[in-house]
Amino acid sequence: MKLLLDTCIFLWFISGDKRLTDSLRELICDPHNEVFLSTVSIWESIVKHQLGKLPLPMPPAEYLPEQRKRHHISSLPLDEDSVVRLSNLPDFHRDPFDRMLICQAIQHRLALVTTDSIIRSYPVNAMPPD
């Protein structure tokens, strides 16, 4: 299975946060799955860190890519075809970062691992929290 991690799922995973269920942790760690983190999530995390809303143990430009690589998670760049999908995406969700992750998941046929119930309103294979 090909998985795209929502930003909070990635942050919970790398920090060992108990909000990440054991079943999702196993799914992410399963060597048969391809796991991706969007550059959009890196962007979102840096913005939140700069606003003082996301404390991190190191500067995000170092910490986030290091953690992604350490956990064998592939980087998913933001491509034009994914961005163009925004023009036809229903306006259920207002968060621009989440909207872009939805577009990337649709464009690249990835299951979006998220706890956000609004994302399930979109035509994307959203992995439920349990």
Image (cartoon, rainbow, N blue to C red):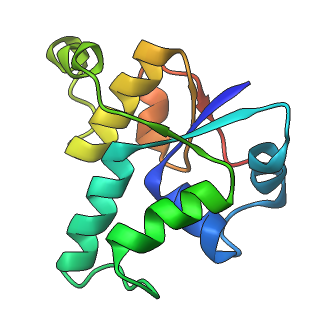
Q: Nearer the viewer, residue 89 or 58?
A: 58
* Quadrant placement of the N terminus: top right
Q: Is residue 13 left or right of residue 57?
A: right
Most foreground residue, 115 or 113: 113
The quadrant holding residue 40 is top left
Q: Is residue 86 above or below residue 66?
A: above
Q: Position of residue 45 (x, y in %)?
A: 33, 64
Expressed as whole percent of the image width and height from the top left, the position of residue 70 reads 66, 61
| Residue 114 percent location from the top left of the image | 55, 46
Up-down: is 25 above or below 53? above
The number of numbered badges drawn on the structure is 0
The answer to whether any part of residue 17 appears in the image is no
Q: Which residue is painted at 25% across and 71% down in the image?
A: 48
Q: Is residue 15 above or below residue 64?
A: below
* Residue at position x 35%, y 45% in the image: 39
- Indicate the position of residue 10 as horizontal and vertical percent values: 55, 58
Determine whether 8 is above or below 4 in the image: below
Q: Residue at x 62, y 76 (%)?
A: 15
In this rendering, would 106 be left or right of 33?
Answer: left
Can the viewer see residue 93 in this picture? yes
Q: Quadrant of residue 121 in the image?
A: top left
- Residue at position x 38%, y 29% from top? 102
